[in-house]
Image: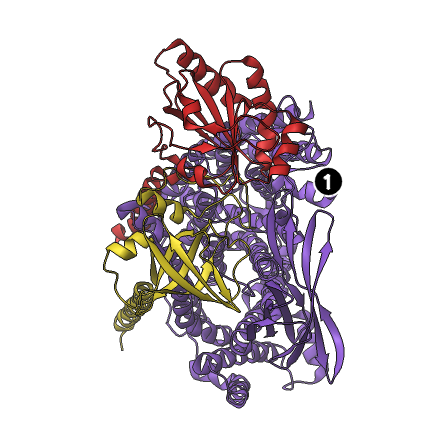
């Protein structure tokens, strides 16, 4: 009964989405206040209905109702409760349900917090959200009904795949989707602005918080995915340029560009059509990511719903949404003329450089991801684009970007003084020299790349701190005044500094871990020791152990410091029975300074075991840096000036601050 | 200058066309090259505890038959198993099992516990015969006509819908000697 | 400098920068395109020497020989075979008789020196390229279908 209720709720949500998508658009065009006023109510109603349907699905999972096909296929009574719940979105139908849930929650948030929006703009934004909802709800209802029944109900579900029971996997998709779908709001704002034919600083101020929120979630989602790959796949790597990873990285690159270009629109009332285009592209890339993963077009381990009718539906949807919005763009964007002209050497000039580099990087990833598909389609040749391609593109593109990130915030709007900015960055230059000296002293094989990375991290890290110090007049004014200034510094400024520091940490983590990591692969017999970088691993042999639903060969490694055992690492090869599957469980000891990472492979007591041991300095800073970037985003989001729900009165009160 | 605003749309159309072609080339959609061909030549011993093995000659008896590729370690097989039991009770055609890369004791236990829908069961221990059949994974189900020609192949677990709309009508048509309208 | 000239310079700089970036991307792209070949491709076509490619097929039964970290095995599409040498730990699902994709290049003796062995599939799943290669060699008749679902986040 409850699944049927959920199904009915989805059908009602589709009807309501149609109403939300059409009436307000017509109402706004014809000036019918009653129809305009429908939008927020419809958005809220849709959110309630979809949330109810999602609740029904969760209930079916929690109670292991195997008469629901989806539950029978993806759950099992023996699963821990956490994974029963995460099982809701761990499959094709359920993940779409999560997608639409997030979409309507964002829609409802616009309805609730968007009180300061002009009524027609709000109605149009919500209408576009409604139309996206129509597309996804009909996708769910017509091709991927999550509530389909399986009668008679089997006694047991079949979803006990051990690889899927993992906390990283449980929480990664919701964050990723919050990011993907969050960009739909920016998209709706862009399309609404094209319909209205007006993009102004106020528009940019409304778009930015939504973009920022989506960006933060996407950053966390990508970081979680990378971390999962690092500890679960047992290869020691943290990013593989896999098509599915690229699918989430492209919207991130475009979204990062959008965040920055929206600032230019807000402050300088220019760069409008580019910003609108970015908003459209960012969401389009999110949809493309969904298409690539869901349609099975990409031969990836990840594709888990490979049904061609679904692929056709998503492609049609993509054609309507992206094609339609780009056609509208071609038609209306020429009217969006910026008012300001600007010099290349200015804050906006630096932001444009940022946009260009991010856009090229995004296009390069798109090329690397789609080209193999295109070639397959044209000539049937199977090719793959190696990670080397992405690495050799990203280094030269990101180098000027990171260098400019330190300078940009020090340049004034309209006309910046590069020499003055560089003078202020003197401490950063000193830091670069120190970093280079350390790099040379540590001596390594990757020579130039290591020095480049260290230099960039130092330049950006200290540069961001310099900018902050100048703002609060550190050492230039009495300490009390500095503290006072720091207190009243807008949160957005703090957010920017923190996010840029996160980038510096990320660059540092990547550089140091890639350069100085030590990897040893060899065959070891019990009792043997091996030096891995500064760490002495002693192999104590392999013992068979038995887990709840697997048997394993567990290796024992002792970490020796000054002749004493300080730690033990226990990597394992697990062998599951149902379904039969072997997994490598790496043993990882994380610390802020370095990770120890051990994997044990095949072997026997006589000839020894194949083992892989690593010492990975600063590798955890990669994810730390990403999280700090997201933290910076959230800080900026908490700025009153950007707060979506801020009553207009207070917004005026803080308006002078906006002018600084 | 105005035309430049059309560039994004034009690029998207190109990419969209490419993706559309990519979809039609989706390897999963190309029908089996085995359809319409005679079954490959093979002879397999029975699985542990069963009398009748499976060979190509058994599939050329003049009567249509169903060949189900299964394994005790395959979870989806367990899901379709009750449906095979039900199909067996219909007595439309004999169902034969091709036991793919399985442990003899495991499969014996499986058939004892869950019931045995199969008339004949061949044990393909190393999967060699599976390769000849083009078995990509388990479960897969083939429908073979009385002359030993493969008429239909179903990839993945059978669902009730597949049984009702594909397997049963097809078997009825074959038994009656009609040209079947069922698409595989 | 007039405003107009400044603008022109800025636009020129922009176009120049984009051209450099495009050249960079495309040359890196060209250098790093890795083709997929089956053992029959290797035997029948003249592949450019010293170019990395991906070799896919089945690991021949009884061909795996291990010596410490070195593993020698034969990849076959059931019509032609190529000996492969790999140094390092093999992935979990590397088995005789199962599909495999190896990344590397041919040495002078026609042996494939793999720097990476991918078996990113589970017990009853085969890399689609391998299935394609087997089909082309006439030994395989059906395409993919990963019935068991191996999912990574992001899907």
- Which residue sits at x=69%, y=25%? A2
Left or right: residue A562 compared with residue A147:
right
Q: Residues within 10 Å of mark 1 (few under 14, many from 20)?
A: few
In the depicted view, which residue is nearer to us: A655 or A391?
Answer: A391
Residue B69 percent across, percent down from the top left: 50, 32
Which chain is home to disc 1? A
Would you say residue A27 is visible in this rendering? no
The residue labelled by disc 1 is: A78
In the depicted view, which residue is nearer to us: C70 or A485?
Answer: C70
Residue C151 percent across, percent down from the top left: 55, 47
- In this rendering, the answer to whether B87 lies above or below B103 is above
Query: Of all residues shown, which one is farthest toward the top?
Result: B176
Q: Which chain is purple?
A: A
- Which residue sits at x=25%, y=64%? C48
Q: Which chain is yellow?
A: C
Q: Which chain is red?
A: B
Quarter in which the C terminus of chain A is drawn: bottom right
Which image quadrant for residue A570? Answer: bottom right
- In this rendering, the answer to whether A78 lies above or below B173 is below
């Amino acid at each position: 009964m409850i699944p049927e209720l959920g199904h009915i709720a989805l059908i009602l949500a589709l009807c309501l989405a149609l109403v939300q998508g059409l009436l307000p658009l017509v109402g706004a065009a014809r000036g019918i206040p009653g129809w305009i006023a429908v939008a927020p109510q419809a958005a809220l109603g849709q959110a309630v209905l979809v949330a109810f349907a999602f609740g029904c699905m969760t209930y079916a999972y929690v109670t292991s109702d195997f008469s629901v096909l989806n539950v029978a296929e993806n759950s099992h009574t023996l699963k821990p409760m956490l994974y029963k719940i995460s099982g809701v979105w761990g499959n094709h139908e359920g993940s779409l349900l999560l997608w639409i849930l997030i979409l309507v929650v964002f829609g409802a948030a616009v309805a609730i917090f968007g009180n300061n929006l002009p009524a027609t703009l709000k109605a149009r934004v919500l209408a576009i959200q409604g139309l996206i909802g129509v597309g996804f709800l009909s996708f769910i209802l017509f091709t991927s009904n999550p509530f389909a029944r399986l009668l008679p109900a089997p006694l047991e579900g079949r979803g006990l795949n051990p690889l899927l029971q993992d906390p990283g996997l449980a929480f990664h998709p919701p964050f990723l989707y919050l990011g993907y779908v969050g960009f739909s709001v920016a998209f709706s704002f862009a399309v609404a602005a094209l319909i209205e034919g007006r993009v102004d600083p106020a528009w940019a101020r409304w778009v930015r918080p939504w973009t920022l929120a989506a960006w933060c979630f996407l950053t966390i989602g990508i970081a979680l995915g990378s971390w999962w790959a690092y500890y679960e796949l047992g290869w020691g790597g943290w990013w593989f340029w896999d098509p599915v990873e690229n699918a989430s990285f492209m919207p991130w690159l475009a979204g990062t560009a959008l965040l920055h270009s929206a600032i230019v629109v807000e402050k300088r009332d220019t760069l409008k059509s580019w910003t609108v285009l970015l908003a459209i592209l960012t969401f389009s890339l999110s949809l493309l990511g969904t298409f690539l993963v869901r349609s099975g077009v990409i031969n990836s381990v990840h594709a888990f719903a490979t049904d061609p009718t679904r692929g056709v539906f998503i492609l049609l949807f993509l054609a309507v949404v992206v094609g339609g919005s780009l056609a509208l763009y071609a038609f209306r964007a020429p009217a969006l003329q910026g008012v300001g002209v600007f010099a290349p050497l200015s804050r906006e000039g630096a932001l444009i450089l940022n946009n260009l580099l991010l856009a090229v990087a995004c296009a390069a990833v798109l090329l690397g991801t789609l080209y193999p598909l295109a070639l397959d389609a044209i000539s049937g040749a199977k090719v793959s684009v190696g990670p080397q391609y992405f690495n050799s593109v990203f280094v030269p593109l990101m180098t000027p970007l990171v260098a400019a990130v330190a300078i940009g915030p020090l340049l004034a709007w309209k006309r910046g003084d590069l020499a003055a900015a560089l003078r202020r960055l003197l401490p950063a230059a000193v830091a670069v020299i120190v970093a280079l000296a350390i790099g040379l002293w540590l001596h390594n094989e990757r020579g130039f790349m290591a020095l480049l990375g260290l230099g960039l991290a130092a330049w950006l890290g200290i540069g961001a701190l310099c900018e902050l110090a100048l703002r609060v007049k550190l050492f230039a004014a009495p300490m009390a005044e500095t503290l006072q200034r720091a207190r009243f510094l807008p949160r957005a400024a703090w957010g920017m500094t923190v996010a840029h520091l996160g980038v510096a940490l990320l660059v540092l983590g990547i550089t140091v871990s890639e350069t100085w990591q030590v990897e040893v692969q060899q065959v070891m017999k019990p009792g043997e020791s091996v030096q891995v970088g500064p760490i002495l691993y002693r192999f104590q042999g392999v013992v068979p152990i038995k887990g709840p639903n697997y048997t394993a060969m567990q290796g024992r490694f002792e970490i020796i410091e000054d002749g004493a055992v300080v730690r033990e690492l226990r990597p394992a090869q697990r062998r599951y029975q149902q379904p039969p599957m072997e997994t490598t469980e790496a043993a990882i000891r994380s610390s802020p300074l370095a990770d120890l990472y051990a994997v044990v492979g095949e072997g026997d007591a006589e000839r020894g075991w194949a083992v892989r041991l690593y010492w990975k300095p600063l590798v955890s800073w990669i994810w730390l840096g990403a999280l700090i970037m997201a933290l910076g985003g959230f800080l900026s989001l908490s700025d009153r000036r950007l707060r979506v729900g801020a009553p207009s009165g207070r917004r005026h009160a803080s308006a002078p601050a906006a002018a600084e | 200058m105005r035309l430049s605003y059309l560039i994004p749309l034009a690029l998207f159309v190109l990419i969209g066309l490419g993706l559309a072609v990519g979809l039609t080339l989706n390897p999963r959609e190309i029908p089996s090259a085995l359809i319409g061909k005679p079954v490959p030549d093979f002879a397999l011993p029975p699985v542990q505890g069963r009398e009748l093995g499976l060979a190509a000659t058994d599939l050329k008896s003049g009567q249509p038959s169903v060949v189900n590729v299964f394994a005790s370690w395959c979870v989806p097989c367990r899901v379709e198993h009750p449906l095979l039991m039900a199909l067996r009770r219909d007595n439309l055609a004999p169902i034969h099992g091709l036991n793919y890369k399985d442990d003899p004791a495991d499969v014996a236990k499986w058939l004892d516990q869950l019931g045995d829908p199969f008339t004949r069961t061949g044990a393909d221990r190393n999967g060699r015969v599976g390769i000849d059949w083009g078995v990509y994974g388990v479960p897969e189900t083939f429908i073979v006509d009385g002359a030993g020609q493969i008429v239909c192949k179903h990839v993945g677990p059978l669902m009730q819908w597949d049984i009702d709309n594909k397997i049963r009508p097809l078997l009825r048509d074959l038994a009656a000697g009609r040209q079947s309208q069922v698409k595989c | 400098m007039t405003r107009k000239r400044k603008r022109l310079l800025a636009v020129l700089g922009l176009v120049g920068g984009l051209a450099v970036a495009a050249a960079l991307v495309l040359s890196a792209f060209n250098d790093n395109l890795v083709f997929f070949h089956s053992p029959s491709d290797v035997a029948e076509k003249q592949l450019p020497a010293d170019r990395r490619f991906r070799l896919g097929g089945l690991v021949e039964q009884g061909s795996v020989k291990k010596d410490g970290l070195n593993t020698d095995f034969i990849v076959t599409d059931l019509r032609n075979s190529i000996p492969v040498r790999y140094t390092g730990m093999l992935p979990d699902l590397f088995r005789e008789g199962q599909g495999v994709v190896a990344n590397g290049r041919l040495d002078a003796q026609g042996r494939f020196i793999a720097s990476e062995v991918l078996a990113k599939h589970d017990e009853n799943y085969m890399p689609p390229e391998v299935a394609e290669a087997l089909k082309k060699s006439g030994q395989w008749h059906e395409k993919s279908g990963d019935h068991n679902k191996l999912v990574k986040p992001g899907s």
